[in-house]
Image: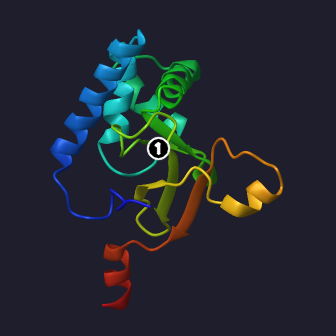
Amino acid sequence: MSDPTGFAPHDHHACVSTALAAAEAACAERGARLTPLRRRALEILLESHKALGAYDLLERLAAEGLGDKPPVAYRALNFLTEQGFAHRIERLNAYVACSHPDAAEGHGAAFLICRDCGRVAEALADKAPLGADAQDAGFTVEDAVVEARGLCPQCQSGATA
């Protein structure tokens, strides 16, 4: 598993610009359209390493005059997840921008979810975490997502102070 992005100090401006550039390049290569609405939805997800629900995103888009009906947010989120620019966090019923936009398309992900501050760190994970068990069962793992809940380093520091 790679080092997770989200809890460690990093250049967040570079994090955002790298993800946007990767999304634009991927769309150009795939012939997909990163419309202004889809781009803005991705920018909103990239603002922090916290997961947002579809209605949280819709509220932001509506405040900016980009649409106030649920399908607006859901269509943007579907596009972003289908293209690999965002991930759905099942446990939270929310979405987070992909922290590894240069990783292989459809990469395995492990999400570390802080139960206190709500930040989410994404680490690249082996697509076959079940390895030998799946192989022994004759099962081919095509996709696997790990979601772990706990306390991030900052919240642990605050809890022990």
In what element is the residue under mark 1? loop
Q: Residues within 10 Å of mark 1 (few under 14, many from 20)?
A: many
96 or 57: nearer the viewer: 96
143 and 14: which is toward the camera: 143
Q: How is the image coloured?
A: rainbow
Quadrant occupied by the C terminus: bottom left
| Relative horizontal placement of residue 153, taking residue 132 as reference (left or right) | left
56 sits left or right of 156 in the view: right
Q: Residue at x 32, y 40 (%)?
A: 46
Q: Which sits in the foreground, 151 or 1?
A: 1
For the N terminus, the image quarter is: bottom left
Residue 111: x %, y % from top left: 50, 57
Q: Is residue 90 left or right of residue 105?
A: right
Task: Count the marks.
Answer: 1
- Amino acid identity at mark 1: Leu
Q: Quadrant of residue 34?
A: top left
Residue 131 x %, y %: 66, 59
* Residue 34 visible in the displayed image: no
Is residue 72 shown above or below 77? above
Looking at the image, which residue sits at the far right?
137
Residue at position x 51%, y 31% in the image: 81
Position of residue 158 in the picture relative to residue 17 (left or right): right
Residue occupying image coordinates x 83% and y 55%: 137
Q: Residue at x 56, y 65 (%)?
A: 148
Q: Circle 1 sits on which residue? A: 52
Is residue 143 visible in the rendered image? The answer is: yes
Residue 14 percent across, percent down from the top left: 17, 43
Residue 73's place in the image compared with 11, above or below, is above
Q: Quadrant of residue 16?
A: top left
